[in-house]
Image: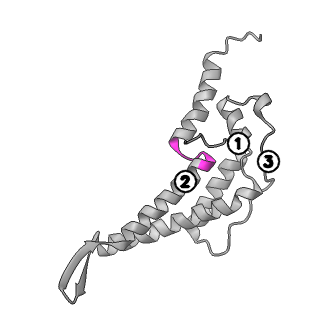
Amino acid sequence: MRTTKPVPAKLKVLRGTYRKDRDGKGLKVPPGQEIPEPPDRFNKDQKALWQTVCTTLRSVDLLQPVGIPLLIIYCDQSRLYQEAFDEVKRSGMITTTVTKYGTVMKKNPALEVMNGAIKIMLAISDQFGFTPLAQSKIKGVARQEQEYNDGYDF
């Protein structure tokens, strides 16, 4: 039977679903103080993505040292996707291979690399709340609080 994925307490607070009586069962990890330097192997685009993602996560106290390896993977997958995309752009979606049976046309293998990178990036995006659905849940809570705030505290 499928269950819902656990959500970090900070994300629950932002969404407005935090309940103190249900908190305290998970590992408490302090947020990171500074944005870490990106790995040396990153290219210019990866460094820009790293800075954007880390800045965004830090602004909502979700940048934690234990999440850094996932962010590195996210940026690596972004590079893989871009390289595969460039390959498809250069050689086309269909490749021609000569075999002993003649010429065979098949899908460019770079398309599979692109699809794999997208899957991994989406999975990581879901964990960190990068997807539009996760963002809408967070913004939706903020809008609800503003709409129903009549100025009275009960």
Could you tell which of marks 3 and 1 lies nearer the N-terminus?
1
User: Looking at the image, which residue is at 37% across and 67% down?
Assistant: 111
Q: Residue pushed farthest front?
A: 1
Q: Say which quarter of the image contains residue 106.
A: bottom left
For mark 3, does the 10 Å Cα neighbourhood hold few (<14), some (14 to 19), or many (20 or more) residues?
Answer: few
Look at discs 3 and 1 and give the one toward the viewer: 3
The CA span between labels 3 and 1 is 10 Å
Q: Which residue is mark 3?
A: 27
User: Looking at the image, which residue is at 55% across and 53% down?
Assistant: 123
Q: Which residue is mark 2?
A: 123
Measured as percent of width and height from the top left, residue 50 is found at 63, 60
For mark 1, does the 10 Å Cα neighbourhood hold few (<14), some (14 to 19), or many (20 or more) residues?
Answer: some
User: Looking at the image, which residue is at 75% across and 53% down?
Assistant: 64
Which region is colored magenta?
127-132
Above or below, 100 relative to 93: below
The CA span between labels 1 and 2 is 16 Å
Q: Secondary structure at mark 1?
A: loop
Q: Identify the amino acid type marked 3.
A: Leu
Measured as percent of width and height from the top left, residue 124 is found at 58, 54
Could you tell which of marks 1 and 2 lies nearer the N-terminus?
1
Could you tell which of marks 3 and 2 lies nearer the N-terminus?
3
Answer whether residue 129 is magenta in the image: yes
Q: Secondary structure at mark 3?
A: loop
Residue 8, disc: 1
Foreground pick, 27 / 152: 27
Q: Identify the amino acid type marked 2.
A: Ala
Q: Secondary structure at mark 2?
A: helix
Look at discs 3 and 2 and give the one toward the viewer: 3
The CA span between labels 3 and 2 is 21 Å
